[in-house]
Structure formats: structure tokens, C-alpha cells
Amino acid sequence: MQVFLHLGLHKTGTSSAQLFLQENRELVWPRAALVLPGRIRAVEQAVFAHHYDRDAGSLAAITAAMRDFLGTLVLGPKRRIVISSENLLGPMPRGLTPAPYPDAAAILRALIAGFDHFDWPVEVTPYLSTRAQDPWVESLWAHHVRKDQPIPFLEDLETFRSRMTRISQAEQIDLLRRDPAGLRLVTQDVSGFDGLPFGAGQPFLDFLGLRPDQRAALRPVSRRNVAPPRAVTEALLALNRQGLGEAALAAAKRALLAEAGQDRTSEEDEA
């Protein structure tokens, strides 16, 4: 069995990739079981719990959650699986820990251990979509500023950036590549998506090995979940700092974004 395990990173075209897979699910499904975030919440929740507990028990819970989830699927030794969820390495980075995704290697090993559920050989290919450090950090910052949350995000970009550079994204990925478990990590920078026929969906098609005539039936999708212009984010940050109540702040943000012609709905799925 072959598994393509897309774990994010956050703000690297994951929403666009998932929309592409969803829109083309009728063509994907005969060739691979398709698992998008809505189907794998229990595993995400176990990963989030480990983000805070970070012990052997919480790692074991990740493996157990993955095994339980896989047990709900109808699979055979030749059936392939495509999984895409940007929360499988933990919450969206906020610069609160030295590494963007603390304990990422241990989490990935725990996820892969869940595939021991099967009585046949399983080859898991972990895939990370990536982005250059500066635009990645700015996109994370814009998301946190824009998101409705009980405690508004108040940091300016440079303060946030200074905390996100203790271990960079590239350094974290290098640590994953050098993990003793010998993980076969595949990466693709978002800067290369524009030159690919199906953008953020291309790595999944490469895994599936579709013929040209099969690819001709696929529907491309436009980019999704793009951050608003910097000036709009700065205006949202100013609203966050006004001390408004949660409902009043949310309403003010909606009004500002509507005036700027920005859609908010696609932000809701990313933690």
C-alpha cells in the first residue's frame, strides 16, 4: 500500500490543494482513498493534545487515533491513500516555541506508526508544501491578526518575525530530513506552483501517476485563502488593539474586510 501524507505546512497553499482534491474527488477516488481535514479531526485533536502534553502517552494517543481512523476505511493491500491536513504537525505556529512545529519528528513517527494497523507492507511518503521564510511568516502573522479569537492578536509583524526566526522553517525541515527514522520526506515550495499545470494539486497527481488523457478531465482551481493586502492587515491589527468586546470586534473586522473586498470564510478551517 502506498500513502501520500500531506501535513502542511500552514499557509503554503494547503487550502488550494485540498480544494483541488475535493473538486476532482470523482477522478481521484478510483485511484486512491481521499482523506481531507473534515474526515480526520480525531487525529488532529490527538496531535494538538500532544502539542501541550508532549510525553510518551500523548504520542501513543496519536498512533492510536490514526489506527482507529484507518480502521474506518475500506482498504486493501493495493489501495492507495491520499491524506491532506495542515494540522497534523500541530497548531499554526505563533512563535511561542523555538521551532515552528515542536516535536515534529516524533509526531510524524507516531502518525506513521498508526499504519501498522495493516497486515501488509505500507509505504508512507510524507509531503510538506513549503514557502520562503519571510513571506511565510508574514502570511502566518496576517492570519493571526485576521482570525476571530477570544484574546485578539496584538503583535506587529516585526515582533512576530523576531520570534519566528529562532529555528527557521528550512532548519526545521532539515531536522526532519536528518531524523534517525530515515523519513522519506518530499517537499515543494509554493513559488513553483505557478509553473505547474495544476498548481498546488500537482504533487498529488504525480503520486497518483495519472495519464495525460486522465489529467485532461481534471478541473483546476484558483488560489484559496490568500492573505489580504498588508494595509488591510494593519487596519485589522489596529482594531484588535482597540479593546472592543469579542462580538463587536468580529463585526468591525467583517465590515472592514467587506469594504476591502476580502472574503473571510476560508480562514475558518485552519487552527
Image (spheres, rainbow, N blue to C red):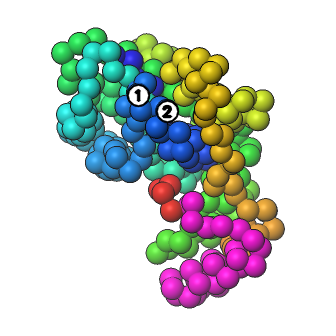
Does residue 127 appear to the left or right of 130 in the view shown?
left
Q: Position of residue 78 (x, y in %)?
A: 32, 15
Q: Which residue is mark 2?
A: 27
Looking at the image, residue 111 sits to the left or right of residue 160; the answer is: left
At label 1, counting other C-alpha atoms closer than 10 Å, the crowd grade (few under 14, some 14-19, many 20 or more) is few
Residue displayed at 46% across by 75% down: 150
Task: Quote the CA–CA distance across marks 1 and 2.
Answer: 6 Å
Quarter of the image for residue 9 reads: top right
User: Are the residues at dot 1 and dot 2 in contact (C-beta closer than 8 Å)?
Assistant: yes
Taking the spot 33% from the left edge, 21% from the top edge, the residue there is: 79
Looking at the rendered structure, the kind of residue marked 1 is: Pro
Depth check: 200 or 54 in front?
200
Tell me the residue that label 1 is attached to.
Answer: 30
**Disc 1 element:** loop
Magenta stretch, residue numbers: 239-267
Residue 205 at x, y percent in the picture: 57, 25
User: What residue is rendered at 62% in x and 59% in y?
Assistant: 143
Query: Any mark on residue 260, and which?
Result: none
Say above or below: 75 vs 164: above
Q: Secondary structure at mark 2?
A: helix
Residue 153 position in % (x across, y down): 58, 68
Amino acid at pointer 2: Leu
* Residue 236 x, y percent position in the rendering: 69, 74
Quick check: 61 left or right of 37? left
Q: Magenta stretch mostly in which secondary structure?
A: helix
For residue 19, say whether it is visible.
yes
Q: Nearer the viewer, residue 113 or 98?
A: 113
